[in-house]
Amino acid sequence: MRLILGLVLAGVAASAAAGSAARAEGIEARDAWIRTPPPGAKAAAGYGLIVNRGIASDRLVGGRSSAAESVEVHQSSMAGGVVRMRSVPAGLAVGGSSNLRLRPEGYHLMLEGLRRPLARGQHVRITLRFQRAGDVGAEFTVRDTAP
């Protein structure tokens, strides 16, 4: 009886893990990059294309990286000749079978509290956090301009 119960529980755990992996595989980051921050900067902005190949909508709610204390979704806007930036705590919707472009002067990821300087050509691992898919790893390249 213990053997059967153990096999059933193992099957349930494997099924749950497979479902989570399948959701994460439906979302990916492409052309991901971080603008080279000036010397001594404590923050940097990340951009790229978020692709949702799944049929269900999802929401990018933030992320984490060993390169920064926090990774948040932000929005830049221009008002009266002044650039304003604000956090978007609710995150950004990514429709099913659609894309979300993170770009300068729009929605982007803000890496705050940089733990070390970022140099052009460096690769930074960011784990993007989605409401449904959970954590999705992405590699960002530090560069001066968009790819």
Image (tube, grey):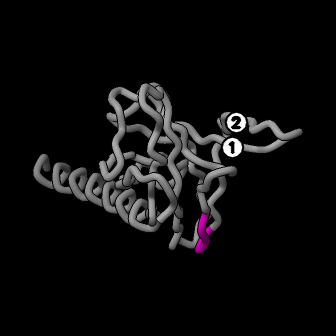
At mark 2, the secondary structure is strand
Q: Pick whichever, 43 or 20, lies toward us.
A: 43
Give the side of residue 105 with respect to residue 25, left or right.
Answer: right
Give the residue at x 32% y 52%.
121
The amino acid pointed to by label 2 is: Met
Q: Position of residue 100 (x, y in %)?
A: 61, 62
Q: Which mark is residue 85?
A: 2
Q: Earlier in the sequence, mark 1 or mark 2?
A: 1
Label 1 is placed on what type of residue?
Answer: Gln
The secondary structure making up most of the magenta span is: strand
Q: For residue 3: magenta?
A: no
Helix or strand or loop: what does disc 1 sit on? strand
Question: Residue at coordinates 31% horizontally, 55% vertically from top-left?
Answer: 17
Q: Residue at x 59, y 48 (%)?
A: 108
| Residue range highlighted in magenta | 96-100
The picture places residue 136, in percent across and down from the top left corner, at 40, 53
Give yes or no for contact between labels 1 and 2 (Cβ–Cβ under 8 Å). Answer: yes
Q: Is residue 101 left or right of residue 53?
A: right
What mark, if any, has residue 75 been given in the picture? 1
Asked whether 63 or 22 is in front, the reply is 63
Can you say whether 88 is above or below 128 in the image? above
Residue 84 figure quarter: top right
